[in-house]
Amino acid sequence: MKTRRLLLLAVAGAVLAATAAAGSVYVTIDTSLKDKKGLGAATIAELKQGAVLELVDNAPPQYQVKTADGKTGFVHMSKVSENKPDDVGGELAKADTNVEVNSEHSSYAIRGLGPKAEQYAQSKGISQASRDAVDKAQALRDKLTPDIEPFVAKLEIGSDN
Amino acid sequence: MKQINRLLQIGVIVTVAAALGCESAGKSLKGVGDLADQGADQIGDSKLKSQIKAGAKVAKSGGEWMAGIDLPKELALGQTFTVRVVEDYGAKPDPLAPDSVQRYVNLVGYVVAKQSTRPNLTFYFVVIKNDTPNAFACPGGFIVVTTAMLKQLQNEAELAGVLGHEIAHVCYKHGLNVVSRNEAMSSAMDFASQWDDTAKFNGFIDQAYENLILNRYDQKDEFQSDESGSLWAYRAGYCATGLHDALKLRTSHGEAKFFSTHPNVDERISKLAAQAKSQPSGDKLPKMSNRYKTEVLDKL
């Protein structure tokens, strides 16, 4: 019976560790804290990716949140998450970039296919067109950043049904 | 009763280990194997004991295998699978959908992935020209979607739900789990010592590819991906019924491969309907039908 209790405690601990503390969310995209819901709201603070916000009211689509320095306002639900980005708070966050992911991907995205995929493709006679297609799709994804903000802004307006 | 309790405990651990997935999946799976092995020692029924011991062996082996796959290896596997999928299912000579469609699908996937349990992983959404509605998740964040799948959907919320489902497969490492549970495959490929052996690597990829394409995921993996994928799409700001609606389209379009490889569609639809109903304002969030028409339907 004692074992069972310990087991349940361990399970509960693991689940809690995997998510953000209850009542808080992380900023996923640099954005603004607004003074009210909807269009025409004024900006009262800039929110940086990775910042922790206290969740005051999670009524969609605009969550009411409170910043670490006590400012309360609204942010669209798409720009925050319960899940903490891996590199937030560490050295990678100080560099203000997803260095870990970018460096992991550098041998794939910048120089085309990685060595394992390339040698597999060559061994199996996979066409150059298919190899180029994957390379092209990766390159296109890596140029996406400037498009993200206007894309999310239209989702935020949310009148397109 | 004691035996049943022990089995229940093992079941709970297996479920939680699967749910946690992510970076610790390999260690969790090995831990499950160790616990199951120990638990089996206390069981009197020799047949049951033998069965649990066998399962524990597979779990431990799979766990060790999974723990040996770090992110660079996961990416390499995913990219290799993706090249093979594009070769086998993409149109010739130009496999890809137009750049503008690729860009749009990546944007939808981006906002959904930011709500996932791997928000910093760069997901690549590759849209290939193919007449069969399908979507396929490869390890490391490579997700292939066919143009027929995009044509079948009616709005961005449905696409967000479908992509969320595939993102969840990546986050929970279901593909790697499928491979690791196959004892013959996992023992045949000890990454620590054989990663650089070209013949063995190629053989492993071929086997794993067949296994993933033909057998796909367990039912529990599908339900888990439905639940998380739908939730993440909702949290990204989309109408909560997106994945539910996409699955329901099956009834009007007949049995498509995407659905035939994901069993129990009716049960999945039922579960998703209940989940969507429980999300605050879930049905009031946008479906983005007009943007989907402009960005996808008008271009394919």
Image (tube, coloured by chain):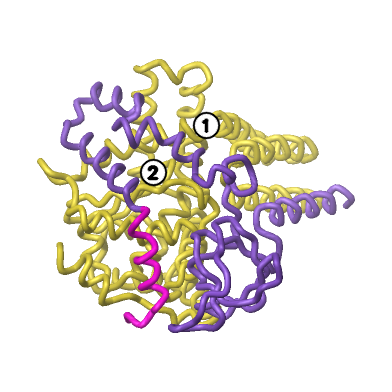
Does residue B223 sit above or below B45 in this rendering? below
Q: Is residue B203 left or right of residue B8?
A: left
* Shade representing chain B: yellow
Segment colored magenta: A145-161
Residue B85 rendering spot, x and y as whole percentages: 27, 41
Does residue B157 sit above or below B185 in this rendering? below
Residue at coordinates 42% horizontally, 17% vertically from top-left? Answer: B196
Can residue B279 be seen?
A: no
Question: Of A5 and B128, which appears nearest the observer?
Answer: B128
Residue at coordinates 38% horizontally, 43% vertically from top-left? Answer: B138
Q: Give the secondary structure at mark 2.
A: strand
Q: Give the secondary structure at mark 1.
A: loop
Q: Amino acid at mark 2?
A: Cys
Membership of A152 in magenta stretch: yes
Q: Residue at label 2?
A: B138
Residue A157 rendering spot, x and y as whole percentages: 39, 78
Question: Of B126 and B61, which appears nearest the observer?
Answer: B126
Does residue A67 sit above or below B32 in this rendering? below
Query: Do the residues bearing badges 1 and 2 touch, measured as CB atoms within 8 Å?
Result: no
Residue B242 rendering spot, x and y as whole percentages: 39, 72
* Shade representing chain A: purple
The chain identifier of the residue carrying mark 1 reads B
Residue A114 rendering spot, x and y as whole percentages: 35, 29
Q: Residue at label 1?
A: B69
Q: Amino acid at mark 1?
A: Ile
Q: On the same chain: label 1 and label 2?
A: yes
